[in-house]
Image (tube, rainbow, N blue to C red):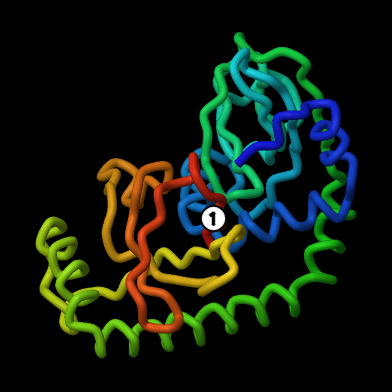
Amino acid sequence: MFDQNYHEQKSEIHDPKWRRAILTVFHSTERARNVWENRCSNPAQTPCQFVSCTDGTRDLIGVVIGGTMPEAADSRLWDLDCAFTILTEDAEILIVKGWYATAVEQVVEDVTEGNEAMKSNEQTYRDDVLDLLVIKAGLAQQLDQSPAAKAFWDIHLERLGAAKWPEGPLPQCLVRFDERTGAKLGLVISGVWVERLGDWDLNEPFLVLSTDGEIQRCEGRVVEQVSVL
């Protein structure tokens, strides 16, 4: 989740490595790309507006992927006085009410510099994607070998109106436990499903099928930190 020390947080948007890292999160997060494509006038562009602020209850930092375009201004930028949508480094998508936001700080990355940075990381990004695909394939085999895991997943598929496994779709939400010494990776197979987002609410308890074939319970991000891969 968010670092509660805003004075440490706000410097991150000035760090080119951090900006490249969160753009990698953007390119690997389908929901974020969908928001960008639906809101941006030129979806072929890459987000370039990095923002840190507080909304009165918490400190926020991320890249802006949607909102309201100001009149007669740079078409790449969003109006931070209106509601705007950010993607955080934890792959969370949050709507910020700009009129409540204070201590707003932003960095707008030059398009050329941004493109060069993304090109330099393109091979690394492809390698990371391939690694995740291999991990998901291995976890799919674990699912096929675990009657209990299949039972949980079939309940979810029935809720979606989909066919049961193996005819139905595979789990797609891969998470990493950042604070555990045991199994580090797992596929979410049960929990609280948010229909409008088409995704799991990882702030609530959920079950994962881990890389060692075990079903593990996570109490949500209030208790332990997990990252969506």
How many badges with numbers are in the image? 1
Place of residue 162 in the rendered image (x, y in percent of width and height, measured from the top left) = 13, 67
Q: Residue drawn at (72%, 23%), measured in percent from left and top?
A: 53
Residue nearest the observer in this picture, 119 or 175 = 175
Instruction: Name the residue at 29% across, 44% down.
Output: 194
Asked if residue 92 lies left or right of residue 186, the reply is right
Q: Is residue 14 left or right of residue 69?
A: right
Q: Residue at x 70, y 30 (%)?
A: 4
In terms of image quadrants, where is residue 52? top right
Judge whether 114 appears above or below 77 on screen: below
- Residue 44 placement (x, y as % from top left): 63, 55
Looking at this view, name the residue that lies furthest to the top. 99
Image quarter for residue 176?
Answer: bottom right
* Element marked by disc 1: strand
Q: Nearer the viewer, residue 214 or 165?
A: 214
Badge 1 density bin: few <14, some 14–19, many ≥20, Cα 10 Å: many
Q: Is residue 130 above or below residue 220?
A: below
Q: Residue furthest front?
A: 181
**Which quadrant of the rendered structure holds the C terminus?**
bottom right
Type of amino acid at the residue the image marks with label 1: Val
Q: Where, quadrant-wise, is the N terminus in this rendering?
A: top right
Mark 1 lies on residue: 226
Q: Position of residue 137 (x, y in %)?
A: 42, 86
Tell me which residue sits at (45%, 81%) in the image: 211
In this rendering, position of residue 87 left or right of residue 193: right
* Residue 5 sits above or below residue 218 on the image: above
Percent of width and height locating residue 74: 76, 30
